[in-house]
Amino acid sequence: MTVTAAATPTMTTPSASASPTPTLLTKAQAAARYTKIVKPVNDALALWQKEARKANPSLTKVRALSGKVADANAAFVRNLQSTPWPADVQPLADEVAASSAGILSSYRQMSKAKTWDDVNAVEFPSSDNSSAQLLRAKLGLPEVPIN
């Protein structure tokens, strides 16, 4: 009788697979992406400004439009942070996201204002919009007027 040793099963450990690195956008793709993701913010802000600049603006409308600006800004920040920008654009995109997050907070506060005094008490972080203008320039996009 021949006794054979039982085969010892070979245990393999699963190899850690790295998450695929997203392909960075080209300048043309990045310009198109930025234009697309900033449009809802610009549109919401234009509506807010139109109402706020009226001789007798509606507090109800300003509050509602402030919420829309805040929501659009939140989506903009998420899109800025999740986009694989070209390497020389990424630092500017990060700066714009940080600046927009502060602005978002101010509009969110206005959306909850109960009185005009509450609206007027909201402070906006100081920003000269230079990061956004530099980002646009890097992407070959025209400057936008600062209101």
Image (cartoon, rainbow, N blue to C red):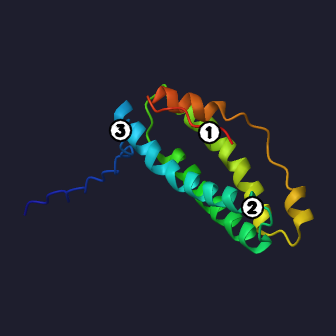
Q: Are there few (<14), some (14-19), or many (20+) residues within 10 Å of tag 2?
A: few
Q: Check the image and report above or below for 34 versus 109.
A: above
Residue 128 in view: yes
Q: Secondary structure at mark 3?
A: helix
Q: CA distance from mark 3 to mark 1?
A: 18 Å
What's the residue at 38%, 31% (across, down)?
A: 27
- Image quarter where the C terminus lies is top right
- Residue 29's label in the rendered image is 3
Q: Answer with mark 3 or mark 1, whichever residue precedes in sequence.
A: 3
Tell me residue 45's x, y (percent): 63, 55
- Dot label at residue 96: 1
**Which amino acid type is shown beneath numbered disc 3?**
Gln
Does the rendering let one see residue 26? no
Label 2 secondary element: loop
Q: In the image, what residue type sits under mark 2?
A: Lys
The residue at which mark 2 appears reads as: 54
- Left or right: where 130 falls relative to 18: right
Q: Give the Cα separation between the discs numbered 2 and 3.
A: 38 Å
x and y, in percent, of residue 106 in the image: 77, 55
Q: Residue furthest front?
A: 55
